Every structure is written in structure tokens, then in C-alpha cells.
Image (spheres, helix red, strand yellow):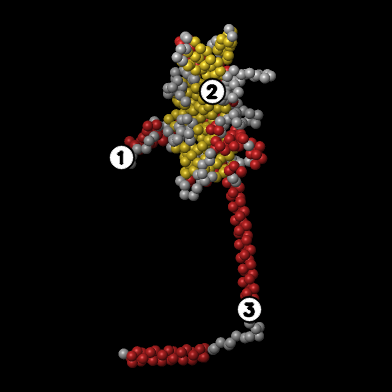
Amino acid sequence: DTNRHAVLLPINGHAVPFHVSMIKSMSYVEDDSSYTLRIFFNGPGVGLGRNTFIAPSSGDPYYIKELAFRSNDREHLLTCEKTFKELRKSVAAKEARDRDAAEMADDFKLVPGVGKAPTLVDVQIKPVLSGRKAIGYLKAYGNGFRFTTQRGETVDFAYDNVRHAFFQSSENDIKVIIHFSFRRPIMLGKKKVYDLQFFTEVMEESMSVNTTRIDGYDRDEIEQEQREREKRNKLNNLFASFVRKVEDYLPKFEDGDPVFEFDIPYRAIGFEGVTERKTALQMYPTTNCLIELTDFPFFVLDVNDVDIAVLERVDFGAKNFDIVFVKKNFKNPAVDVKNCIVNVSTVPNENMDAVKEWLSNAQIRVFEMRSPLAWKEIISHIRAHLDDFEADGWEPVLGEDEDEEEEEDEEDEDATFTADDEEEEEDEEEYMDDDDEEESDFAPDEEEEEGMDWDEMEDQAAKDDAERDFSDEETDRKKRKRR
């Protein structure tokens, strides 16, 4: 019964319906003299999927584990098996659509705003619509945005579904970007997306690769660079003007702030890192996020979702280290471990101090480890001993965090410094006591010998000179005598 998503099985002369979710699998077995269709049911003691449905029961339930139907009609059993698989696939697709619909942003109708609506023309969208490059314009309305392509395709999204908005100007990049991250996904064609980007290329991507100049003073190259610089400045100003106009045009909260504001990357503390794409990318912190918007798929990590950050492979002499962000949903057993951990690897060591300062300003606790950790086992252990973790925190798992270690080191240094000071003071006191004892060896009534006057000093000097001359003559005489 495809309409009711049920399989009718003949039992004691009656057609008994079973919903496809109750059936785990079917298998066709061919014997020497007959053909058998074996049907396996979901029930206690059977390995079940995460979304498998078990019928509620009352009293002492009885479960059917397996039914087998034997027939001489081979084609009929094969048709039954094929029909079941197709029905189960269609039911799974419908359930997936229902789940997506529950997650999707609510449908809304755009309403005109007050005043002249800000509009940004000649921009592209990513991900692309209909699998093709599309150029169009982005226009602000009273409650959302609409992007319209030259082919007439439209994409609408509401202001209240925007979680983060970014404006990234072009400095050494090939494009100027406005990027939106959503609270709930929207449909882009037949795809579900959490991020949408609008951009204009400053130069063709193929021209962004550095090439060796033939002549550093070539007039054509200088003019081309000048044109690119002028185009970059013009586009940066155009996008920046649109951002300012949108923030003025947006609905306001009671305190006068717009419903969202555009964030910009802090390029001065940007660093290179490798994410799931296995490619080194330039990442930039912002006020609330860590982002990489130039390449697709985009990387947007909200620091408000992060519980701790662990710097792994931190060792003297190493060229780089890894950053592991543990999200706050790690305690939820329904969340897959891979969705609790965000790994940014191969960050150059020269960026470590800047990364620590950024994490500290974001009020994220930082731990340092010499080796990578087995996070799947760690999260599973925490979930199994959640009461102990709630009482003790991360320290028994990872040790002291980086800030506490620095405070302890400072306390140790202060204690050492104080002890050294005390020892120095004791040595000074002993030295002063020795001086007093040495001074006490001289009697107070002793007087220094009187010095000679000038005449006596001249007579003494003359006498010393005469003795020295006599000694020199005697030495020369002995040398001649030996010869």
C-alpha cells in the first residue's frame, strides 16, 4: 500500500499491514526447489538506526523477529522485494523533506520599506543558482533582502533570520564581499544553505596568480596596475556605502540599534590555517566570529558557541600548531562528536601570541597540549560521566589552562625573588657585621705615622736612584765576567 506506506503480509488468511518503518530489511533466497522471501523486523535486541521507530506497547509485548514466505513464483517475490525497497526510499526522502521543512526559515512576504531602498548592482551570488554563474542586484526591503538575477530568478531572506553579516573589502583579495550567515537554512533552488554571499571581482581569478615581470618599468603593466587600484577603490567605496545605507535602513530595536550590524575582519591578526578542505587558507577573527570567506565552502565559527580552545602540538622548535575549538553542545548525546569539534590545523608558530590574545579577548579558556588528543574518546567519556565533569570541569581531563599556568609561574617567580632578596639581605648584614669586627681590631688610641716633608722625600728619591744605578752596573759587570 504505497499511499499508506505499508506492506501487506498474508498471515492466517488475512492481509496484515506493517508500516515500512517497522521492517528492517528483506532478502530473497533461492533454494533448489523453491524461492523464499525473508522479512526481518525492528525490535529489541536488533541493531537499530538513530531514527528507527519502535511501536509503543502496553503490558507484556510480543515482537516478531522474522517472517519467511515461500513460493514457486520467483518473479513475484523479486517484484515484492523491489517494490519494498522503492517504497522505503520514497518514505525516507519524504521524512528528510519534512525534517528540512521543520528546520527551514519560515516563509515570509517582502514588504516595502520607508524611503529609498539601498540597492547594490552588478553582484554575483554564491552558492550559484541553477548551477550557473548569475549576475544581478541585491535590494533591501522593509523586512528582508531580495536578490534578482538577469534571468529573473529571485532569492529572498528575512532580516530576523540573519545571524551574522560581514563586509570584507578587497586589499590583496580578488573580490569585495558581503556575506550573510543564517540562523535557520534557506532554500537556494533545491539546496539547503546556511550561508549566502554577494561579491564583485576586482580582477579575474586567473589573473590573481603572481607572474614574473619581464620589465619592472613596463608602461602597460604600470597602467594596468593603476586601473586595478582605481577599480578596487571604487568597488570598496561602493560596497561600504551600501553597508552604511542598509544599517540606517534596517528596522531598529527599542534602544535604537539595527536588528543586525555588519562585522569586518581584523586583518592585522589574521593567520593561515587548514580546515576540513585540507587547504591552507587565510582566516580572520572578527568581533564575534572566526571567518574565511574567499573560498567555498565558507568557514564561519561563532565564538559564542565555543566552550574552550585547545592549542595542540605546542612544542619548542615546532613550526606550527593546531587549534581545536570545543563547542558548547558537546554534552548533548544526540549531537555527533564531529559536530562538537572544529579543528584549524597547521597555524604558523609566529601567530601564537596573536591567537592567544584574540581568544583571551573573546573570553575563551585556552589549554595547551604537546600532542593531539583523541577527542571522540574524550567526549564519549565526558558524556558517560557527566556528573563528575560538571563538578570538576576540564582540569582533570586537560590539566590547568594556559592562563592559570601563567599565574602560577608568576607566583613561583615572586616567591623565588622574595627568597633571593632575603638571602641577599642576610649576606649584606653578615658583611656589615664583619666590617664592624674588622674595625674593632684597631685600637682607638692608635695614630697614623707622620708623613715625610718635601726635603726628606727628595733626599730619599736621590738615595733610591743611586742604589738603582749601582745595582745596574754590578749586573753588567757580572755578565761581562761570565763571557
First of labels 3, 1 by sequence position: 1
* Residue of label 1: 214
Q: Which mark is residue 172?
A: none
Rendered residue at 59%/24% (across/down): 45
Indicate the position of residue 108 as horizontal and vertical percent values.
58, 19
* Residue of label 2: 186
* Residue of label 3: 439
Do labels 1 and 2 touch, CB within 8 Å? no
Q: What kind of element bears circle 3? A: helix
Closer to us: mark 3 or mark 1?
3
First of labels 3, 2 by sequence position: 2
Tell which residue pokes out farthest to the front in this image. 33
Q: What residue type is labelled 1?
A: Ile
Q: What kind of element bears circle 2? A: strand
Mark 2 closeness class: few <14, some 14–19, many ≥20 residues within 10 Å: many
Q: In this view, does 420 lie above or below 272?
A: below
Rendered residue at 59%/37% (across/down): 381
Mark 1 closeness class: few <14, some 14–19, many ≥20 residues within 10 Å: few
Q: What kind of element bears circle 1? A: loop
Rendered residue at 47%/13% (across/down): 35
* Distance between the alpha carbons at the discs numbered 3 and 1: 85 Å
Position of the C terminus, as image quadrant, is bottom left
Q: In this view, does 393 lie to the left or right of 298?
A: right
Indicate the position of residue 384 as horizontal and vertical percent values.
62, 35
Mark 3 closeness class: few <14, some 14–19, many ≥20 residues within 10 Å: few
Q: What residue type is labelled 2?
A: Ile
Indicate the position of residue 212 as horizontal and vertical percent values.
33, 39
First of labels 1, 2 by sequence position: 2
